[in-house]
Each structure stands twice: as C-alpha cells, then as structure tokens.
C-alpha cells in the first residue's frame, strides 16, 4: 500500500512524488472527447445512473466499469454491460435489500436492457471517482490488470483483483458479501491514501501510475512507481 507523503514498509514498495501542479484543462477535454467516441463505437446505452464520476474500459475484455456516488450511503462500483440499468431511483445498493423494488419499473430498452446489482458497495460514502485498469507490470505482478478506484474521502485509492471471467471482483473476509459495512472493513483493498481529492488515475507512457488530485487546494499530479525492482 502506498501512502502520501511517506511510503509504508510493505512489499512491493511504491515511491510517490508530486511532479506538477496547477494542472490545465485542454488535455482532459481531449481525453473526454476520445471517451465519448469510444462509447459510441461500443454501441451501448445506459440508464438511471447516479453521479458517476468514473468510467473505464477493461483492456482485456472491453467491458465498461463505472462508479456512482450515493446520496448519503451506498457508493457503488458497477459493471455496465450493454443495456445496463443501474436502478436509480428505484434501488440504491442491492436490490434484495431494497423494500418494494420492482425491476419492471425500470427502462428496459425495448426488452434489450437489464438491471444488474453493483459489484461493490460502500455503506459509508467515500465518493468514488476515477476508474483505471492497471494494464502495466511496472508496479509488480500483484497489481497487473487489477482495478483501481480513486476517491475523495481521505484521498484513498482502492485496489480490486478480478475473477477469471473478469465480470466480478475477488473479495474475501468481511467483503465477501460485496459490501463494506464500515470503512474499517476496507483495509485489505486500500492501495494508497492521503492524495487529496482524487479526480483522475492514468498510466503514463513510462508504465507508471499518475494520480491527478486537488491536494491542499492545489491541482497536483503524483507519480507512483516501484521503489525496488519487482520480479
């Protein structure tokens, strides 16, 4: 796990350094336009999503994943397959925990759409933001092609391995029910923290992780790389 401003003495060790501040907007606008084009090519339509600040494609499957902020509870990570309906406002969190939920009340895209439960829920909100699949081995094989999710609360980056089908997250212990009832249950999935308000995660041309954040009211980019050579 990486922690700013110091790294923790756990293997693999990661090195963090702020490399820029007062980040401008043109590059982000260009990336947003590219993402819209990719969604159009994907041929997908999605409905009833709430405050989704992060979307990302799995490079191994092409599947789209997204995060949603709950109103005061139940932040979500969702796998958004074509025709996906997240259920807002009929359901927040899991359908079987929502009294009176009826999926027939949702848009079904002429019979082609479907409701799907979240793949993970935070009961205590963390305000998840950016979604990134770590398609690089620069941080070690442990993290290769795992899912990273940035957040606002405590500037935390969460890390999720995926199962063999890459349609579900690999969760164990208190998270085996796909939910964190308290933030204390998330220790096993924390990749790093104290980055400020995280707005974007990207892999750079050098294969390392870059974190864009509002850190102490300054737009800042942090570089995260392996401190030691990892085989």
Image: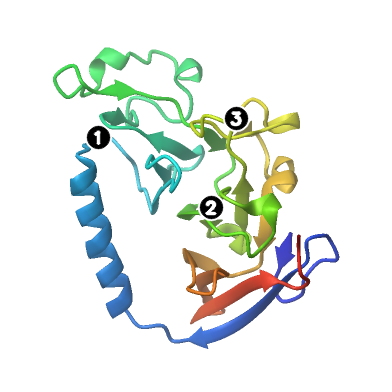
Q: What residue do we see at 31% from left, 16% from top? A: 103
Residue 47 image point, x, y percent? 24, 34
* Farthest residue, direction front: 231
> Earlier along the polypeptide chain: callout 1 or callout 3?
1
Disc 1, SS: loop
Secondary structure under the numbered disc 2 in the rendered image: strand
Mark number displayed over residue 149:
2
| Residue, disc 3 | 178
- Please give the name of the residue rendered at 67% of the width and 27% of the height, measured from the top-left corner: 176
Contact between labelled residues 1 and 2, with CB atoms less than 8 Å apart: no
Furthest-left residue in this view: 110
Q: Using the numbered discs, state the Cα–Cα distance from disc 2 to disc 3 in whole angstroms.
A: 15 Å
Residue 22 location, x and y as percent? 43, 86
Q: Quadrant of residue 107?
A: top left
Labelled disc at residue 47: 1
Q: Residues within 10 Å of mark 1 (few under 14, many from 20)?
A: some
State the CA–CA distance, disc 1 to disc 3: 22 Å
Q: Secondary structure at mark 3?
A: loop
* The N terminus: image quadrant: bottom right
């Amino acid at each position: 796990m990486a922690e700013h401003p110091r790294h923790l003495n756990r293997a693999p060790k990661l090195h963090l350094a702020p490399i820029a501040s007062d980040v401008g907007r043109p590059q982000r606008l260009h990336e947003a336009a590219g993402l819209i084009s990719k969604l159009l090519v994907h041929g997908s339509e999605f409905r009833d999503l709430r405050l989704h600040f992060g979307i990302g494609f799995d490079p191994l499957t092409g599947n789209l994943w997204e995060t949603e902020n709950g109103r005061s509870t139940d932040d979500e990570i969702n796998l958004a397959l074509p025709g996906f309906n997240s259920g807002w406002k009929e359901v927040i969190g899991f359908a079987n925990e929502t009294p009176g939920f009826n999926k027939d009340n949702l848009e079904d895209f002429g019979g082609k759409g479907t409701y799907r439960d979240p793949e993970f829920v935070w009961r205590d909100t963390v305000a998840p933001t950016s979604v990134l699949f770590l398609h690089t081995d620069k941080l070690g094989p442990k993290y290769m092609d795992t899912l990273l999710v940035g957040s606002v609360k405590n500037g935390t980056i969460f890390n999720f391995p995926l199962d063999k089908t890459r349609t579900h997250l690999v969760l164990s212990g208190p998270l085996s029910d796909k939910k964190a009832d308290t933030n204390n249950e998330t220790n096993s999935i924390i990749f790093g923290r104290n980055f400020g308000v995280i707005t974007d995660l990207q892999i750079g041309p050098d294969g390392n992780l870059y974190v864009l954040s509002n850190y102490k009211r300054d737009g800042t980019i942090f570089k995260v790389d392996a401190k030691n050579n990892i085989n």
